[in-house]
Image: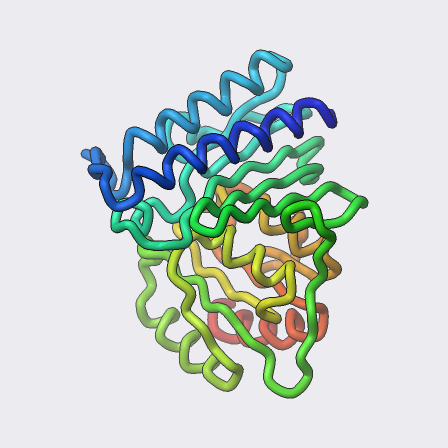
Amino acid sequence: MEKIYQKIIEQIVNSGKRIREKSGKIQDIGVTKKNLTEEDIRIERELKQIIKDFNPKHEFYSEEENENFLEAEDVWVADPISGTHVFIDGLPHYGIVIAHLHNHEVQFAAVYDPSMNDLYTAYRNKGAYLNGQKIFVKSNSEKPRIIFNLSLGWKDAASAKKMFYELSDFELYRVLGSHAVNDSLIACGKYNGVVCLAKDSFPYFASSLMIKEAGGVFTNLNGDENIKPSDRVFIGGDKATYQKLKAIVEQILK
């Protein structure tokens, strides 16, 4: 699998460098949904072609043209442009995100942030990396730094407001852009924890492995590490911070 992983990495980096020049200069072509560009479609199609050329039995699950999760031994989950709205607006930090699942367990993840030219990668049982250097989560017992990832598509405004209020006891941040990039910042120790209220699950398969391989915990609302396509709530961070955040999330949403 090392060869296909490397090919995928090269593809997302090359795509990211191309779209960086288009950020803020590209149209939203969405009709049935907002925040869709020709680059979302192109990147998704190119990734799918690489994977199908490698092994036609591998299935592909992605946001634009491959939204049906097909059961298979090997499934690739991609978010061709995570944070398309900021890409369209010419703001950081959008990303290109992909993960490989074998028997529902994430084996490999890659997140590329074109705004910073930062490549995050993770390999099951082999660690997480930023631009080739191993990364680790960090703890802060005094006042953990928390990111609150709230999707534009999250429908329950009341729970979001309550979550923001409860999380304000921490050093709380709302970081614009891709949730997968934000979650990768947890993995490299820039922040200590994250709560995600999401509109879909596409980027979080990669987030789960990235944070786990960096020494942290990342789960769905039920505490499961194996993310499911139907999941919409995610919690992550170093082990102590994760436990605090999970208790808050459960109190509000369960």
Rendered image quadrant of residue 175? bottom left
Q: Which residue lies furthest to the right in this view?
A: 125
User: Measured along the vertical axis of the image, is residue 25 above or below residue 54?
Assistant: below
In which quadrant will I find the N terminus? top right
Give percent across and percent down for residue 69: 51, 30
Q: Residue at x 56, y 76 (%)?
A: 145
Residue in the picture at 61% in, 20% down: 58
Asked if residue 230 can be seen in this view, the reply is: no
Image coords of residue 133 (percent x, y): 71, 51
Q: Which residue is drawn at 55% across and 44% down?
A: 111
Looking at the rendered structure, the number of numbered marks drawn on it comes to 0
Residue 53 occupies quadrant:
top right
Q: Position of residue 99 (x, y in %)?
A: 60, 37
Report whether residue 24 is seen: yes
* Residue 21: image location, x then y, percent: 33, 39
Vertical arrangement, residue 216 with respect to residue 153, above or below: below
Q: Identify the residue shown where x is 42% and y is 22%.
A: 45
Q: In this view, does 119 lie to the left or right of 34?
A: right
Height in image: 57 above or below 103?
Answer: above
Residue 31 left/right relative to 40: left
How is colour applied across the structure in the image? Answer: rainbow
Indicate whether 149 appears above or below 28.
below
